[in-house]
Image: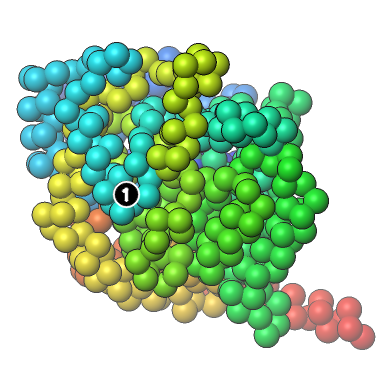
Amino acid sequence: MRFPNPSPACPRAANRAGSAVDGQPWRIPLANPSLDETRPGLGARSVRAVWHPCTPMRPGAATTPLAIARGEGVWLYDEDDRRLFDATSSWWVNLFGHAHPAINAALKAQLDTLEHVMLAGCTHAPAVELAERLAALTGGALGHAFFASDGASAVEIALKMSFHYWCNTGLPGKREFVCLRNGYHGETIGALAVTDVALFRDAYDPLLARAHVVMSPDARQARAGEGAADVARRALDELESLLQHRAGDIAALIVEPLVQGAAGMAMHDPVYLDGLRALCDRFRVHLIADEIAVGCGRTGSFFAWEQMRGGAPLGRHQWPDFLCLSKGISGGYLPLSLVLSRDAIHEAFVADDLARSFLHSHSYTGNPLACRAALATLDLFERDDVLAHNRERARWLADGLLPLATDARLVHARQRGLIWAADLRADIDVANFAEAFHRAALAHGVLIRPIGRTVYVMPPYVFDAADARWLGQRLLAALDATVPPATAAMQAVDAAGQEVSHAA
Ligand SMILES: *Cc1c(COP(=O)(O)O)cnc(C)c1O
């Protein structure tokens, strides 16, 4: 188990278990007398009828999910109209808050025009326009977009395309993949093969293809005297020796640029991306950037990859060969994913021989409603100069969460754009920390789910400085409830005492 605390901490759904046990402090009695009292609540019915994703299923302890009735901006409202701050953007998908008027209006208009048509042999304006606009955002480097619905499908498509490209260009031996320690790329069988999260992987290990797992550039691994860039260089050295021996068998490397989300918001120096590009060029290995979580302005630039050289404009050759997008691209409204690829890769599939074509498809590929939501999302980026405003929001977030960043119970406080994270100090022992913190935060009006011992915040891009301060105070209160300051201090003394006795 690679999570420091493998408790029911499912990285994304961490501790949904226990989130809504009847009688918990955040739950207030039904306020609406018109509700049929004999009818069980939505949460209880859900447990009976819905198989919930990524949720521990303990016998006799079925836990009731939180029933959400509506959303508005950063807020979610439960059945009792109690509001919760959506601190992790509903599994990292939401960008501009819930029920955004502009995205709502765009979707309503699309609904009355064309709800769906297949993208094989047909096309439609939303898909074409979206592909064109995303290509333009890469300066034309990634000129072709392949559409799917979920992040995992995008990853599978990129893996298949890479392998198939090498076949088409006479190198069918290149069929292996490289992924990073603690990397996460989705949970279908192909995507899981390049995912290094034991909790998700282990049960299905016999079904999975083998990938090469290389050192993560996670800056927390810095040794005395080392900085984040030194860790990145060590990780690159390890990769280089793998490629020296095996590049002839390797089709592609897949990476989450800048922030490895499910690893616990592990962040690395951008120099790592520069190094990856150089190594992949030198050894003729495709570079797949999985920007499913970090794309769409989350890390400060529209694509995280753009920070490869400190934000200096990139030449076409400096982009990855494939870039996967999902989650935020539809504003958090509808399932949509895309694989952007170089025109030269697309070219290699253009042939009379059917076997050389990429015959992959999904029924809802390029769904017009999802594409329209994405276009409305891109419109908002332009209209509101979102990237500039997010720089300000990132400062608000840093200021608001300062009480946590400087708290002695937390270490490795870190931030990249609108992702903030810190870890519970290693010597503090709290049973099921993630679950306990999640519950405590709910009692304080915040929906948040730590990953193991990592508390992270990934809010929609519509909060202000006062919201950030409020969030900092509420999360500090949740921390106090989970790890009382006195307990933490005592454990620190114990740990120090043990060190002294070991030394003696
Ligand atoms: C969420 C995620 C995926 C998988 O996306 P799904 O839509 O959940 O299949 C893949 N890669 C990364 C980096 C992700 O964060």
Q: Position of residue 153 (x, y in %)?
A: 47, 29
Question: Is 422 displayed left or right of 248 in the figure?
Answer: left
Query: Looking at this view, is 303 or 265 the one in front?
Result: 303
Do we see residue 478 in this rendering? no
Query: Looking at this view, is 154 or 423 the one in front?
Result: 154
Do we see residue 125 in this rendering? yes
Question: Is 130 displayed left or right of 459 in the figure?
Answer: left
Quarter-of-image position of residue 355 = top right
Residue 150 vertical position relative to residue 321 in the rendered view, above or below = above
Q: Amino acid at mark 1?
A: Gly
Residue at position x 42%, y 42% from top?
342
> Circle 1 is placed at which residue position?
140
Query: Looking at this view, is 153 or 444 the one in front?
Result: 153
Residue 370 vertical position relative to residue 277 in the rendered view, above or below = above
In the rendered image, the quadrant that contains the C terminus is: bottom right
Query: Looking at this view, is 144 or 221 the one in front?
Result: 144
Q: Position of residue 37 (x, y in %)?
A: 26, 19
Question: Is 377 displayed left or right of 405 in the figure?
Answer: left
Residue at position x 17%, y 28% from top?
125
Residue 189 vertical position relative to residue 93 in the rendered view, above or below = above
Query: In this view, which residue lies farthest toward the right?
Result: 504
Residue at position x 63%, y 48% from top?
284
Quarter-of-image position of residue 48 = top left
Residue at position x 9%, y 20% from top?
113
Task: Mark 1 and ligand 1: say if the CB distance to the nearest ligand atom is below 8 Å.
Answer: no
Judging from the image, what secondary structure is the residue with disc 1 in? Answer: loop
Q: Position of residue 490 (x, y in %)?
A: 65, 75
